[in-house]
Image (spheres, grey):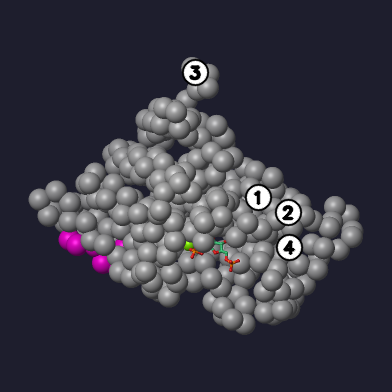
Amino acid sequence: MEEKATTLGEFIIDNQKSFQYSSGELSRIINSIRLAAKVVSYKVNKAGLVDITGAAGETNIQGEDQQKLDVYANEVFIQTLKNREIVCGIASEENDEFITVEGKDKSHKNKYVVLMDPLDGSSNIDVNVSVGTVFSVYRRVTPVGTPVTLDDFLQPGTMQVAAGYVIYGTSTMLVYTTGDGVNGFTLNPAIGTFYLSHPNMKFSPDGAIYSINEGHYLQFPQGVKDYIKYCQAEEGDRPYTSRYIGSLVSDIHRNMIKGGIYIYPTSSKAPKGKLRLLYECNPMAFIAEQAGGKASDGFRRIMEIKPTELHERVPFFCGSYNMVAKAEEFMLKAS
Ligand code: AHM
Ligand code: MG
């Protein structure tokens, strides 16, 4: 690494002034996430060595088995955010209810809520495939000085002030936006420092990769089936290449770098889709839009959906702008 490379710490300080609420609190949240990400990264990298993988015997609200690393990552992110006295509430995919953070002297003076999926794609851990953390930050809507309520968490994605993901891959990367473009930082594990490695990340308007679990093809809505056939047709720049890791963060990250579309549609077995609006889709949609891409439920802009419950699921189409627009055309035609 060159000496003049920008570290994440420097980048946060340099960019703090451009943020509309420049009290420094948001910078401290990103700093907390940076710290927790390093701790989780270290543990994920050791997963194959120690007896930590495998189900922990608990089941989350969606009825799925939790892996031990999910529990660990959840605790690390929650504790790190709590300890720093910056957030007034935290909601996690792994917790049934949101957590109220009283703050200094139980004053409820903190202004931000964080929503997160602490370790997404955890079924991939046992086979040494990349997993990720996804996070989203909002300003509270209830008055400072009072405890947070559900209303603070059920805000549309357009109200996000920051969002990002950490990918624990061949390298660990932290990618985030505060509404002024998307920047990616790679961890040098030897010294525990993130360096700016992917400045101003962009989805190309067109791409040649489609990512969807085609095993569920027969259960997909007609518009999705038609779009898949379109991707496979021998015409112009098609057929596109199919790439599906089954780890949202990795699939979106690859498509942002190479150009492509990720789809997790509804199906007859999952009539609302699988992914969660608040913990997965909204933050990825904010990143995608900030990178010139598009995110939709097939018909509507993801970030304009008004959530009605914490663990709400939604179909998700995300990626290169023209590819998502094309998939929406097929959805509309078949509806
Ligand atoms: P999780 O939050 O339980 O880990 O599930 C989310 C994951 C995503 O990372 C991934 O894109 C998707 O589930 C894969 O689902 P499927 O195996 O049905 O294709
Ligand atoms: Mg998840």
| Camera sees residue 153 | no
Q: Is residue 16 above or below residue 130?
A: above
The numbered dot on residue 209 is 2
Residue at the spot x=53%, y=71% of the render?
Answer: 274
Residue at the spot x=66%, y=58% of the render?
Answer: 244
Crowd rating for badge 1 (residues with CA inside 10 Å; few <14, some 14–19, many 20+): many
Pick the quarter of the image with the C terminus: bottom right
Kind of residue at badge 1: Asn
Q: Earlier in the sequence, mark 4 or mark 2?
A: 2
Crowd rating for badge 4 (residues with CA inside 10 Å; few <14, some 14–19, many 20+): some
How many discs mark residues in the rendered view? Answer: 4
Q: What range is drawn magenta here?
A: 146-152
Where is residue 7 shown, x and y percent of the image?
Answer: 44, 28
Asked if the residue under mark 3 is in contact with the one under mark 2, i.e. CB atoms within 8 Å, the reply is: no
> CA gap, disc 4 to disc 2?
14 Å
In the picture of the structure, the residue carrying the numbered disc 3 is 4
